[in-house]
Amino acid sequence: MTIPVHKYDVVIVGAGGAGLRAALQVSEAGLKTAVLSKVFPTRSHTVAAQGGVAASLGNVTEDNWHWHMYDTVKGSDWLGDQDAIEFMVKKANEVVVELEHFGMPFDRLDSGKIYQRPFGGHSQNYGEKPVNRSCAAADRTGHAMLHAMYQRNVKANTQFFVEWMALDLIRDEDGDVLGVTAMEMETGEVHIFHAKATIFATGGAGRIYYSSTNAFINTGDGVGMAARAGIPLEDMEFWQFHPTGVAGAGVLITEGVRGEGGILRNASGERFMERYAPNLKDLASRDVVSRSMVTEINEGRGCGPDKDHVLLDITHLSPETIMKRLPGIREISIQFAGVDPIKAPIPVVPTCHYQMGGIPTNYKGQVIVPKGDEKSVPVGGFYAAGECACASVHGANRLGTNSLLDLLVFGKSSGESVVEDLKGNPRAHKPLPANAADVSLARIARLDNQKNGESVHEVRLAMQRTMQKHAGVFRFNDLLKAGVEEIKKVAERAKTTEIKDKSKVWNTARTEALELDNLIEVAKATMISAEARKESRGAHVRDDALDTAETPAGRDDKNWLKHTLWYSEGNRLDYKPVNLQPMSADVESIALAKRTY
Amino acid sequence: MSANTKRTVQFKIYRYDPDKDNAPYMQDITVELEQSDKKLLDALVRLKVKDDSLAFRRSCREGVCGSDAMNVNGKNRLACLTDVDELPQPIVLRPLPGLPVVRDLIVDMTQFFKQYHSIKPYLINNDPPPERERLQSPEEREELNGLYECILCACCSTSCPSFWWNPDKFVGPAGLLAAYRFIADTRDQATNERLDNLEDPYRLFRCHTIMNCVDVCPKGLNPTKAIGKIKEMMVRRAV
């Protein structure tokens, strides 16, 4: 069988925020670029981001990147790499202003400058008080951003392959990446995209959990492809549970609601965050707020007939403020909670939201892996940015609004690196291995011929329930141990899923089966990495990590101040040190300290 | 009818798989919903467990990505924002009207996006970019409300008879809303060029204010009003 081969300088997989930002950089540099996306670009999940993007513009309150850096390092529970964090916070103003120049309709202050609101974990003067750092377009910042960047790419004549699903990474004997195989969803045909540089911007995999704010498409495709191709995954035990998903529906309610003055209340109406975070209260870091909420619920102070959620109250805000600053939230609340937040509080519960870990990269967006004695060697031709990547700027817990910043900064830097690397080394395309498409074709042939298998739905549900039960907001030694065995069993079951639909045309059953392969890699990585990390840090909190003088709040810097690396083959674990050194001499390392808000 | 009980829902769904069907047909199918299934999209996902060959687009399930637009009991809607219990049964589902069907509820949106792209949907400002943000007053920014929120779901354009007759010549409500979004932006410098681009018997003037677009927009936007403003500017420019 002859497989069609498309030759490009650059192939970008994913057309959300990171992919579009990277695409702009390489397209405008004149490189021949193909952007592959499972969905039309403006349907990517960046569209659902609500509250804002962080930048220390200081339009409302005094601010600077030093404070932003401190907040991000502290938010990461010191697991973030300080060189990458310094790079990101220093670039923030530049990339946000650029976006404004692209036409993004930010809200405005009376001064005509970009509107900024407070957000969780962001502070003035090293934790002293909340700061207005989140640049927002009402509560539709992601939508406004994604459309503005898509529009800018239309102007730049970027070439999109819409509704193409990348299947597998192509590597040669040297380990260099030469592109991907991809399936055109309309025809079911597999093609090869042969590239000098491949950028993954495939987003997160929140769909490994039963209850998630994530879109259906967030199936960790890039992360799964990388893992199958032998690239280790970094810090996959760290998943952010957003404090405010709509109870029952999982749909996101932005932290911007609390930034505008919203308050979390328990069954007796108490503002319970005052007990857990006396300083920043409802605007403490997300991991802290989510744990506080679960503690309230576990101790019987939850709301509703089943005492299974808490309430997010904005009834004290003026209807004008709600209509102007939080119109989308009002719509969502009416649609999915049956509540008009002008009149009554919104029932909310912590919900899986964001993958802090991912494909290991440096701040240039180059994918880095251990090789010999070295821990961070770039993989030739391979780059990653956004939620699928781990730079690592979020460490063990991401601050709200830092994700949109991450995808802008690292989308751009990965694009710049590609331009630079191809300019410095204008090598021709390396020859494709003879078997470049074999793995993908075998996966599809397996699905075409499978008999007597379970449905994709059944296996996916088993995976989601396992993750929800065994690797949630609070983690327990015995549940994690059992979870490792459970998830390995589910992974076996995924190898024999059967689909009834055998059509070549727009076969969504097949797409979902192929997505499940990716989800399974992510689920295994998460459970195995979590079981192994015998401490509490950021979003990973376990019952047997005790609060002692050497291990405050269960955090064990002596033994666990290190990044996890999980390899799919044999479920092998490795570790590498956290980079505590900033990038430049402009700032000193943020010293380890106990984390309180 | 309570949303909190298990209940069976009847569907009549347009099915067509060019790989095996000679012609489209309507499939009668029922599905039992779980308590938590509230939206039409929940029901479709449940249906797909029963028959994995049913093809439809979906992603965010909260009305911001614009994937799951379809014709529901004769009206274009987003499945994820439609309460299933409020729909008379059998619930009749068809692909968006006026665009070629690829399979089942999936249409080929090429023509729709071609029209969107034809209005140059990006900010045009040829001044060298300043170091900081371009300033815009809150009042100027408010002019963009009701315009920038479009999710490109195509509910409007595919409910518009003028778009059905001339999808290649009439820009359609979604594209024209986007055109006005840039005209109304104080940072954009291409108003004249944009008006020139629409000055022809079809591109703009095929809008006969039927207002189906306003009726179906799941985001509550008003393309007809935006189109009226463009027409007004054309007239003012002419005198």
Image (cartoon, coloured by chain):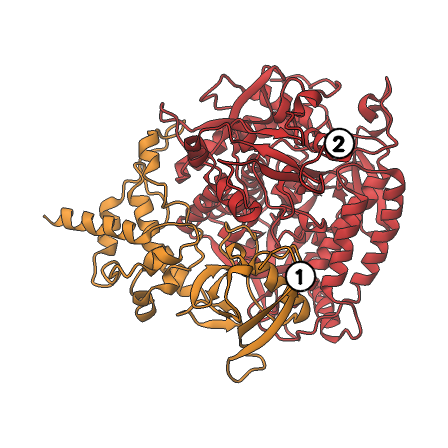
- Say which of A121 and B185 sits in front: A121
Mark 2, chain letter? A
- Say which of A281 and A203 sits in front: A281
Which chain is assigned orange? B
Q: Which residue is mark 1?
A: B6
Q: Residue at x 48, y 28 (%)?
A: A317
Q: Is A246 displayed left or right of A231 in the figure?
A: left
Q: Residue at x 24, y 48 (%)?
A: B229
Q: Is residue B78 above or below residue B8?
A: above
Name the amino acid, label 2. Answer: Thr
Q: Which residue is mark 2?
A: A295
* Residue A372 seen: no
Q: Residues within 10 Å of mark 1 (few under 14, many from 20)?
A: few
* Residue A110, horizontal then vertical, whole percent: 36, 24
| Residues at marks 1 and 2 touching, judged by CB atoms closer than 8 Å | no
The part of the image, by quadrant, that contains residue A481 is: top right
Mark 1, chain letter? B
